[in-house]
Amino acid sequence: MDHFNLRNGELHAEDVPLAAIADAVGTPVYVYSRATLERHLQVFREGLSGLDDPLIAYSVKANPNAALLAVLAKQGAGADVVSAGELLRAVAAGIPAGKIVFSGVGKTAAEMRIALEHGIYQFNLESEPEAEMLSAIAVQMGKIANVAYRINPDVDALTHAKISTGKAENKFGIPYESSLVAYAALARMPGLRIQGVDVHIGSQLTTLAPFEAAFSRLGVLIGQLREAGHSIETADLGGGLGVPYDPSEPLPPSPAEYGAMVQRITARWNVRLLFEPGRVIAGNAGVLLSRVIRVKQGATQPFVIVDAAMNDLVRPAMYEAWHDIRAVRPRNSQITASVVGPICETGDSFASGRTIDAVEADDLIAFATAGAYGANMATTYNSRPLVPEVLVSGDKWAIVRARPPIEALIAGDSIPDWVR
Ligand code: LLP
């Protein structure tokens, strides 16, 4: 459920007409709903209500805007970060270091130092060389790092290949079969304290079976690790729960169904469970608002050319992703068309041959479910300034990231003297 609804024939974010935001800020612009964001965290938390003191570490990469992080921090969320940048943004927005886990396959020495200085809750390590590096740095700094190994369970998440992370051939984690040997070596490294285990098999999962397979394997491993004398206090189950994008597809499992499955599988683990949800928290809390530049009749079909492009929302170009397209002032008629951006690539397309609300030049449209992996993956390709972001709460709204002037883009480069 979200708070983007038609009122008096006009699409609103909570109590604010999207057209008012478009008029004031210009388009394209991301618009987020605070009530939706809070509700999704709440629903996820309720889904886990049968568990003892779980840590919900919001995956910052889904949407790292400070205003959104601050909303989630106020609701008690922790953070899953994958870079020093994400770590510092989370801390700056009020998420305590004691609720932060650091994931990622390529943590650098500098990033490890920053995380150790802040005293984060857990490092999720992905290889022995990485563990050795952290060990040396922790010893140097006189600190103890709480660590887990991310285990690659060799499970197919049945999602898009580019966001599937838990198969043996993927770059992530320690191969399942090597886990016991890896933990034995970890236990001998000074400066590290083994705290738990970790798994994350992919994103936008639309069935529970792959989670269940991965978690079951992790459960077996926890038993083996304890038998080998390791103390396992936490199990991080990662993120990955999918959200509905295409209304013609079956609904993904709800947080309640996910939580019930987790409770069943982990009933005897005797650990604190950690979760790293990203998309399920932020996805439906945002839309990308765009204006139709013109409608062009192609040889085989009409093209609706809009002022948002693949540099603003790359998911369709990158993952063939579906985002629902809604007219902000629907006319109760429909057209079948391709919806494309102005960028000079055929891949700059949001939908082809799709039946959508009929639109004309100057109409506003909204790409739904764009709160996660939207603004944060934007670029300035084709020298288009980064897309701005707005947060709505009730009848209030504010720009939470302004559109930079084109002059800033130009001023960002410098021409060496020896070229001038
Ligand atoms: N934990 C780890 C270690 C991750 O790598 C990710 C996402 C998450 C948690 C959060 O996953 P979520 O709950 O959001 O599924 N750009 C892609 C998605 C990439 C996901 C990367 N890792 C997209 O637009 O679909």
Image (cartoon, grey):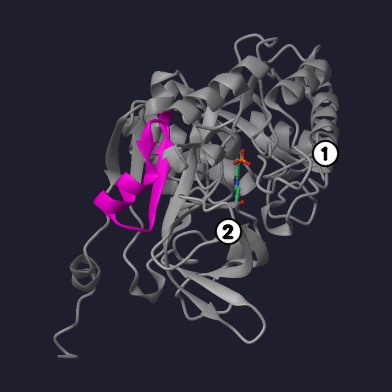
Q: Position of residue 22 (x, y in %)?
A: 33, 52
Is residue 409 covered in magenta?
no
At 52% from the left and 23% from the top, the residue drawn is 39
| Residue 31 is inside the magenta segment | yes
Dot 1 falls on a residue whose secondary structure is: helix
- Extreme residue toward the bottom, this view: 419
Q: How many marks?
A: 2
Asked if disc 2 is less than 8 Å from ligand 1, the answer is yes
Going by the image, does 375 lie left or right of 166? Answer: left
Q: Which residue is mark 2?
A: 315
**Image x and y of residue 180, in percent:** 79, 34
| Element at label 2 | helix
Residue at the image point whose x is 19% and y is 82% from the top: 415
Q: Residues within 10 Å of mark 2 (few under 14, many from 20)?
A: some
Q: Which residue is mark 1?
A: 210
Q: Residue at x 75, y 46 (%)?
A: 166
Which of the 4 image quadrants contains residue 315?
bottom right
Q: Position of residue 1 (x, y in %)?
A: 59, 30
Q: Which dot marks residue 355?
A: none
Q: Quadrant of the C terminus?
A: bottom left
406 vs 83, nearest the viewer:
406
Q: Earlier in the sequence, mark 1 or mark 2?
A: 1
Q: Nearer the viewer, residue 98 or 149?
A: 98
The amino acid marked with disc number 2 is Arg
Q: Which residues are magenta?
A: 13-34
- The answer to whether any part of residue 243 appears in the image is yes
Amino acid type shown at disc 1: Pro
Above or below: residue 194 compared with residue 363: above
